[in-house]
Every structure is written in C-alpha cells, then in structure tokens.
Image (cartoon, rainbow, N blue to C red):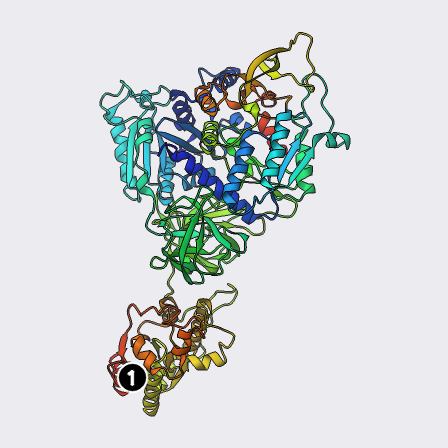
Amino acid sequence: MKNKHLRILENESIYVMREAAAQFENPAILFSGGKDSILLVHLARKAFYPAKFPFPLVHIDTGHNFPETIVYRDELIEKLGARLIVGSVQESIDKGRVVEETGPEASRNWLQTVTLLDTIKEHKIDAAIGGGRRDEERARAKERFFSHRDIYGQWDPKNQRPELWNIFNGRKNPGEHFRVFPISNWTELDVWQYISQEKIALPSLYFSHKRKVFDRDGVTFAYTDFMTLLPHEKVYEKTVRFRTIGDATCTGTVDSNANTLEDIIAEVAASRLTERGNRNDDKRSEAAMEDRKLQGYF
Amino acid sequence: MDLLRFTTAGSVDDGKSTLIGRLLFDSKLIFEDQLQEIERTSKRRGEDGLNLALLTDGLRAEREQNITIDVAYRYFATPRRKFIIADTPGHEQYTRNMVTGASTADLAVILIDARKGVSRQSKRHASISSLLQIPHIVVCVNKMDLVEYSRDRFEEIVQEFEEFAGKLEVEDITFIPISALKGDNIVNKTENMPWYKGSTLMYHLEHVNIASDKNLVDFRFPVQYVIRPHQDFRGFAGRIVSGVIRPGEEIMVLPSRLTSTVRSIVTMNGELEEASAGVSVVMTIEDDIDISRGDMIVRKKNVPQVASKFDAFFCWMNPKSMEVDRQYMLMHSTRAVKAYARDIIYRLNVDTLHREKNGTLELNDIGRVEFETSQPLYFDPYKNNRGAGSFIVIDPATNVTVGAGMIRSAVVEETTQPAIKQKKSPDVVWHEWNIPREVREERNGHKAAVLWLTGLSASGKSTIARELEKKIYQKGCRTMLLDGDQVRHGLCSDLGFSDYDRTENIRRVAETARLFFEHGNIVICTFISPFQSDRDFARSLLPDGRFFEIYVDCDIETARTRDPKGLYERAIKGEIKNFTGISSPYEKPAKPELILNSKNYKPEELVDILYEELYSNQILT
C-alpha cells in the first residue's frame, strides 16, 4: 500500500481522541485555524462517526488574525454544529491580566498563555486537545500523548508520567488538567500527504497568492494593520504562501508558487528549512519553546 | 510506505546521539536552520566540529549537562519507510525510560563502544529489549575507527554478546560494525572494513521484515467508547489489539460471556469487509447486549485467560519503593481496576540475570510479581500478545504511573491446601480450621469429597444423587446434598439466570460445598453448571483427588421428552429466557472424572458405578 504509514498514524490518533473522550469529562479541541488543528477536527469527526462531533473548539484570539482564518473557522463551526469558545487576548489586556508588549516587534504570542489558562479554567476544560507534533520542535519532542498540567497550568518535563504501550493515564486532581496530543507522531510531510489524501479543505493562506509584505531579520512578513514598520522597512508585493499560520505578527511567509496540495507536498519534501524556521516566536532564545511550554503554552 | 518504530539505547559515551544525528544527517534529513543552530551552539561551547548530539537533546537541562533525561521521539523517512525513533537515555537511573521506549518498539538498536566491549549497560539494554519482547535487535559496535577497524575486536564483542544473549529470549539479532562519528556503515557502506559483508544500518532498518510480528490469530477488541447517535444505532468504538474480524462472525463479550454476531464494521469512509490488528473501528452487533467501556469483544472459540490473579514481569518506576498489599490502580487495555501485589517472587538483576530475593522493588528494579485485582482481567500472556498482556500501575494517592507490567500467566491456586480467598481485602487473614479435616475424617471412617454432577436440565442428576446419598448414608457416612432448586430458594434467591448470575450462583455453591467438605462430608452437588470455568473454580477450592466432576450425559432430545417440570416446552416457546441447551450454551466437561450415560443406563446402574468410583478412589474403604 502506498500510504500505509498514514493509515497507521490515523488509527493511532483516533484511538487517542477516543481515550480523551472516555477518560475526561469536559475535553475540548484547541483550534488555531492552522492546518494541524484542522487535521485534529477531521480526525475527531472520524473517531466518533456516525455520532455528532463531540468536542467544543477553543480559539485563543490574539486579535491579530488574518481575516481568512476567521472566515474558515466560522464556516467550519457551522458545518460541524459544534460549539465555539473564544478566549480573547484583548480582553485579558483590558482586564489587566497581562500587559501588552511595546515597540515594533511587539507580539501577543507570550500573552496567549494567560488567556489560554483563564479560558481553560472558566470553561472547566479538563483535557485540551492540541495539534502539537513532536517533530516540530525539540521541547515538543519530549511530550506525552497525555500530558499532565498542574493547577497553575504548568508542565514539569523532568517529572513526566511514563507512558507505555498505548495505555494512557489521565487521572488527576481537581483543578489540574491535561493536554492531549493525538498527532504527536505525525511529521509536517505526513500532515500534508494526509490532507491531500483526504481532500481536506484549508484556508487560502496556505496556497500561493499575491500580498503586501515587508522584510525583517531575514523573514518576509505579511503587512497588516497590526505591524509597525521600522524606518528602513519597505512594503512591496510578492507571491507567497504560509507554511504555518499563527498570529499575524509572528508568522512569516515563504516564497512559493505552490497553489495545489501536490505542489505543497513537493515543496515540503524538498525544503531544507524547518517549518517553524520563520516563526519569530521561536527565535527569542535557544529554549524559547521550552520556556513557554513550562508556563502552560500550547 | 511502511512505518518502523525503533528504540536506541546506549550510555552517554557510546555515541548514541551522534548515531541518530548521523542517520538524519546522512539521509539529508537535518534542516539547514537546525544545522546552523547546532553550529552556533557547538562553536559557542568551544567544541571541535559539529556536535550532532545537540540535535536530539531537547531540554535545556539536557543540553547543559550533556545528557539525555527523557525519552525523545525523532522522525525521519526514506522512500521505503517512515521511522519513529524512541531515543532513551543510557544512564542507570533512567531505566524506566528505556522500558517506556521499548514498549512500542519493533526493533532495538543497542550500541557498544568497540574499545570497552559489552558493558553492564549493554546487557541491561538487551535484557529489557527481551523482557519487552522487541522482535528484532541490532547491535551496533561503534567507534570502530578507534580500534583500527579490527575484525578480531568486532568478532570478540559479537561472541561476548551472544554468550549473554543466549540466556535471553531474543529471536533475531544482527551485528553491524560502525563508526557513527565517521559515518562508516550507517547509510553508506564503508571501505574501511572490507571484511564485513553485511548490510549498513540504514539498509537493515529499511528492509527488516516486521509484517509477521503482528498477532493475527487472537481477536481482541477492548471497547473504548460506546457510540449512540440515535435510538437505532449502537456501536462499540475501539482499536483492534490483535486478530482479524469480519461481519457475520460470532463473537463473545467479556465479562458477561453473552454471544452475538458482528453486524457491521463502521468507519467514516464506509463499512469494512474485514478489519485487523491496529485498526480503529466502530463495531455493531446483531443482539442488544449491554456492553460498555472496559468490556472486551473476542471470538467465541478463542477466549483469553480470565483471572484476577496473575504473575507478571514488573518494572517499578517510582522513587518511593513498591509495597506489597498496598492498594494500587491497575490499567489494562481500557479497564481500570483496584489491585495489589500479593507477592514479589524475585527481583531480576538485569545485568547478570540473577534472581534475588528482596521482598520489595525500588526505582528501576524489575521483578516477578504476583498481582491480584478486584475484578478479573481478560488477558493473553505478553509473550503471545503485547497489547493484551501489558498493564500499568498507578498510585491512587498521587495519580502517578508507578510501574508497568508484562503478564506471564494466570495464577492457579495450589490445590493441596484449602484455597485462601483474599478477593475483598488483603487484611482478611486465613486461619487454619480449629479441628482439622483429617481428624474428622479419622473419626468418620471415610474421607471427605465433593461429587459434582453436571448436565442438562432433566438429564437425571438429581435422581442419581438422591439414591446415592441414601445408599452411603445407610452405610454410616456423613453426607450432604446440595441441589440447584434448593439453593435458589435461599442462599442464591437474589440471583437470576444471566451468565454473570450463573457464575455467582456456582461460586456460592462451591464455597458452601467446601465448608461441608472441611467438615468431613461427602458432598453431592447437582447443578446444571454449564460453564467449564465455573466448574474449574469449584475444583480449584479443593485438594487434588477430592473433587469429582461427573458428567451426566444425556442428549437434549431425551431430556426434552422427560422434562418433568415442563421447562423445555416453556423455553422453546420463549417463556423462559437463558435456558441451558435452548437459548444458553452448555459446555461439556473437558476432562470429567466420570461420565454417566443416563440415556442408555438406568439410574440404579449409574448409582452403582458412582459408588464403585468412591471405593476405587479410596474415599470409602
């Protein structure tokens, strides 16, 4: 069989989804509008078919969205008949829970953690199902499928519960929660191959298009209302696409003419840069992801 | 493209991280930005060349201390296969991670430093790989460049390792001489060792046959979740642990033992005509049987072991040492039950394979432990079925996973002593009988025994039993007759005729029979007792040679024509549910002590045969 590995991964992810549904009272899917969370939704539909989609979607909204993401999100919610929970970073700022960074490189990325944890608490979510993959980043390579978070939402990577075979221990005390990562074992290429095989619709941002961009620290960013240009930076038009989609202030574009899934797969397979290589948020230090994860980040 | 999961284990200095870095690097799977970052870090730390270990060590503490703390998962793919590496640390205190990594692996790569030879660590890795039944082992003799690519040195190490591995259960071992640092025999064949004719590590990983490692014989389907979108659909979601199933095939549900037929195997992409090990599906069945998470669907003619006492290889993974008789939670497939360790039989020294009597298990110890659970588990020995033979143990006080086990087999009680039932609480201690049975038997002038008559309703069990009892009573024996109808009026009046209730009925009767037995009686029990496992349970309570399973053999047609109570008639009309022989199964005794054919012989003749049997077994003298 050509894509036997995709079937193996799919079966594993469905198993994890069902364990989350069975072991927790109030699980939810963390939905960013990126391809990994779209994949999660697709796998969850498969896991519970023919029953109705069982999880609410949680969107942590930095307020710095690409409009395409929001359109896609709302259409998906309607199609699934699922509940949408929005955690707003703007609200966290307004309530004084966090203080916004200043300066041209300001990002709301770090602030999301507080909003995320507040949302989890408010809605009594005991399992937040995320699209984290172990191949994405070094600290994520150490994640369990069922990853425990203490009452402060913190991760303790050095004292993780051993996870053997496919027996997942989701026992916890009140106030604690779990992060569940059903697609832990997928690589970027696996995700794209699967999206193509299953004909999953994606936001248009993933395909090449013309847009206004500018360059900063070797990364080409989309020019949006949320970005303040430095004096030497110039806005120009270019054909690009996004390889990952996060907050608009920290996701760089890639030069690309790929406008079909086949083109994208070929591009990813040939790429010599990692997926997160043009994510500003990871570049702050050698352990940027680990530091954020310890605090309760995605 | 297929998928192979392998684990790598080796000490800090064996060059494990370098090997993984090399596999990724030589197969051009390291990205440029990763490479640049490693270059930057290597330079900053004043290291010569490229420190490939930096690729795999994910946590800051690991990079700072130059060690691997936790299991890290790495991914790469070639056109033939996708690979998942569970990279586990080598130092001793992290054995638990090695076990974790090994639990899902198809293959283990064990690294040996050519200069140092087979170390304690290498032996430990081999033992753990064998205990966790990893089907394939590759021993990479690394740093060959530092022993001048010497063939003699390589062969010396091969021999030393094989000597040790001979004591283990390992079926497939391959030895490859390599240098991870220089890239010899990793992806590309080296010219430095022309004497080596085997394949490179990468070639081996790409071609080793894993298709036949799956258990496709024993169908095991633990129910994960019940899917009920509307009144007319009730499906059981789960992942097939082993075996194959098709619509139309007969199944049995554990623990209820109710049977039915598979109606359909549902997925979002359409119904399947066949599903096998590893596949996540939703199954629907023909009958409306109560099934919930934790139940297991199996084939009627291939049932796993069902027991609440079993013996397992067990790895303890917590800093606080293991306690016998303390209550833990045990998770096995989709079930969670209360459990405690009854006995730590021995601790296995994984470096030497010596068995040590220790009484406890400390962090990273592996031993043979006997467990008892509050509810029976349905399992296969781990050796035959990894998915149905593995479990984890959780400390209910902290919710932490404290151990992992691999079941060897069910524990059958010693039958020379009265059975000690500790089902409910370990605090209930068995006391010897005040007046031993032997003393009573001496006064009675005969031995005690239990005669268990099993067979269909109206097969003649009661008639035979009543005549026999009269006969031996007149001879002066102490006797007691326990009859199905009697106990159902009192002792078991709360029970019905479901499989569960039948089992409980027999359990109570068996325990009662045992009390009369200990009192010195010849106890005659007449019960349909359709299940072999229930009769076996009764047998397990008594010493060898004192339990007589007597099959009163009568075909169902004959029984129907007798039918003194008109029960068959009513069962056929559907007025009585779960009637043995009509709507509920009867399992003929596999090895009865005696078969009494009540179709062809008169009751008096059969009583005589039974009476003779008591003499020939020296119950009566």
Q: Quadrant of the C terminus of chain B?
A: bottom left
Q: Is residue B344 visible?
A: no
**Identity of the residue furthest to the right in this view:** A95
The amino acid sitting under disc 1 is: Leu
Q: At which x and y percent is residue A233? A: 65, 9
Q: How many marks?
A: 1
Residues A25 and B127: in front is A25
Q: Quadrant of the N terminus of chain B?
A: top left
**Identity of the residue furthest to the top in this view:** A232
Looking at the image, residue A152 lies above or below residue B142: below
Label 1 resides on the chain identified as: B
- Name the residue rendered at 49%, 73% in the picture: B495
Residue annotated with mark 1: B620
**From the viewer's perspective, is B67 left or right of A110?**
left
**From the viewer's perspective, is B39 left or right of B350?**
right
Looking at the image, residue B569 lies above or below residue A234: below
**From the viewer's perspective, is B485 left or right of A28?**
left
**From the viewer's perspective, is B608 left or right of B381?**
left
Residues B199 and A77: in front is A77
Residues B122 and B39: in front is B39
Residue B349 quadrant? top left
- Name the residue rendered at 29%, 28% in the picture: B176
Residues A12 and B566: in front is B566
Residue B535 quadrant? bottom left
Q: Is residue B493 visible?
A: yes
Crowd band around label 1 with a 10 angstrom C-alpha radius: few (<14), some (14–19), many (20+): some
Q: At which x and y percent is residue B587? A: 34, 68
Q: At which x and y percent is residue A200? A: 50, 32
- Name the residue rendered at 48%, 73% in the picture: B496
Q: Determine the secondary structure under disc 1.
A: loop
Q: At which x and y percent is residue B300? A: 36, 59
